[in-house]
Image (cartoon, rainbow, N blue to C red):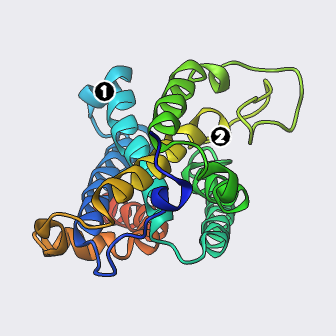
Amino acid sequence: MHASPSAQTAQPSRRRIVLLDTLRGLLLVSMIAFHATYDAAYIYGYDVSWFLDPLIQDVWRASISWSFLFLAGWMTSFSHNNLRRAGVYGAAALLVWLATTVAALDTPINFGILFCMFSCTLVWAAAQRILIRIPSALGIVVCLALFAALWDVPHQTYGIPGLAWLGLPDAGFSSGDYYPIIPFAFMYLSGAFASRRYNARHRGEYPDLAYHNLVPPLTWLGQRSLVVYLAHQVLIVLVFEVLAVL
């Protein structure tokens, strides 16, 4: 028997799940290291030959972005207003696009990871009443299968302009960070379904360890993840510029 919609939307504990902040902080450290290495190799000309291997870049990048999207989907269970949460992501995505366009240090970011979080959270907020009626286990399996099956869609080019946001870029499209709705929405949605399945099976309670601040510096970063994300690239550039002067 499948859990009822009400059971699948069981609310998580009112106590803060600090472990989620810590995990987010760990992902931020990995992301900052990735972007610093990228800038060192491609913008400032440092000898980072090991990083030039496409496989290393792809695996490292995926370990960060897929985890961020899954975790963002998981957090739909904790948000009191996913529509407002989508608006915050959208405003941040617009700010990143403006900053990278004006700075012009590298290819401007069009439809990057923050755009993906914005669009996915907006979809969840709009369709939640329908989506929560899907058995969570089925939702996880279907979403991960679609993510894998549609992986190559945005790696092709298409003859219809203006659909890069969906995952159908035309030949003239470029972006320094590209996470369109297809296929990445399905990684986000798998996190949302996984969160609801966990809450239904465990009545919203987490292991006692999850409520403790095990690594305070990572937890601090994770609790300020959006601010850190928006500021980190500027700080990285400033560090490299100072090193260049010295």
Graded by Cα atoms within 10 Å as few (under 14), some (14 to 19) or many (20 or more), the crowding at tag 2 reads many
Separation of residues labelled 2 and 1 (CA atoms): 22 Å
Q: Nearer the viewer, residue 159 or 153?
A: 153
Counting residues from the N terminus, which is met first, the one under dot 2 or under dot 1?
Answer: 1
Residue 151 shown left or right of residue 1 in the figure: right
Identity of the amino acid at label 1?
A: Ile
Q: Quadrant of residue 207?
A: bottom left
Image x and y of residue 138, in percent: 50, 34
Looking at the image, residue 86 lies above or below residue 135: below
Image x and y of residue 199, in percent: 36, 59
Secondary element type, mark 2:
loop
Name the residue at 70% across, 33% down. 167
Q: Nearer the viewer, residue 2 or 63?
A: 2
- Whether tag 2 and tag 1 are in contact, CB under 8 A, the answer is no
- Residue 44: tell me if it is visible: no
Looking at the image, residue 76 lies above or below residue 85: above
Name the residue at 76% across, 37% down. 164
Looking at the image, residue 113 lies above or below residue 186: below
Secondary element type, mark 1:
helix
Residue 239 shown left or right of residue 99 in the figure: left
Image x and y of residue 89, in percent: 60, 66
Q: Quadrant of residue 211?
A: bottom left
Instruction: Give the position of the C terminus as an image quadrant.
Output: bottom left
Residue furthest bottom as drawn = 15
Q: Nearer the viewer, residue 49 or 134?
A: 134
Say the numbered circle drawn on residue 180.
2
Say the numbered circle drawn on residue 56.
1
Residue 121 shown left or right of residue 61 in the figure: right
